[in-house]
Image (cartoon, grey):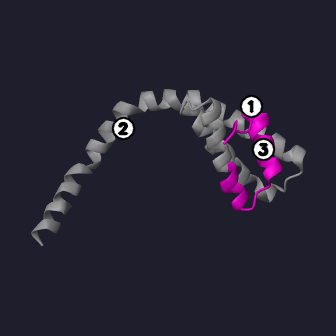
Amino acid sequence: MSDATKRIAKWDAKFKTDRVKATLDDLRPAMLTSVQGTYPNLVSMETQVKQVLDAEGVATLDYPFYLAFGRQVWRLQRQEISGDSLAKEVAVLITKWVGRGLSLPVLEAIRTQVFNVGPPAGP
């Protein structure tokens, strides 16, 4: 019982709302700057993915799944993964999303047209 009481006390001390607010208030300007630099790129990528989906005749019901794939590839690029490493990671994502029922040719079109990533070189 004593251990549970200590854990509750530690949690309560850690999550005092005035501390959390003060921390967020300190971080907010940098967070806002980051968001202002990131969101336009994200929206641009999503628009390009939607254009590919429209050209491929994909049903709008399936758009969220293809957009999720696009966000995952975008996240990899933001982590500064490039070259054949990026191509291999994207190939893994394509395999995952094909397994979930998405179309291989559409995923490859997104990979190539939106992200300018080709298939991985060799085994």
Mark 2 crowd level (few <14, some 14–19, many ≥20, 10 Å Cα): few
Q: Residue at x 68, y 36 (%)?
A: 43
Residue 119 position, x and y percent, is 73, 39
The residue where tag 1 is placed is 116
Q: Quadrant of residue 28?
A: top left
The residue where tag 2 is placed is 24
Q: In the rendered structure, which segment of residues is drawn in magenta?
A: 94-123
Could you tell me how far apart the alpha carbons at marks 2 and 3 are, in whole angstroms? Answer: 40 Å
The residue where tag 3 is placed is 108
Amino acid marked by disc 2: Leu
In the figure, is residue 105 to the left or right of 70?
right
In the figure, is residue 115 to the left or right of 7?
right
Q: Nearer the viewer, residue 29 or 114?
A: 114
User: Is 14 above or below relative to 3?
Assistant: above
Could you tell me how far apart the alpha carbons at marks 1 and 2 are, in whole angstroms? Answer: 37 Å
Say what secondary structure mark 1 lies in: loop
Query: Which residue is at the far front?
Result: 123
Residue 96 position, x and y percent, is 66, 55
Q: Residue at x 86, y 46 (%)?
A: 54
* First along the sequence among labels 1 and 2: 2
Could you tell me how far apart the alpha carbons at marks 3 and 1 are, in whole angstroms? Answer: 10 Å
Mark 3 crowd level (few <14, some 14–19, many ≥20, 10 Å Cα): some
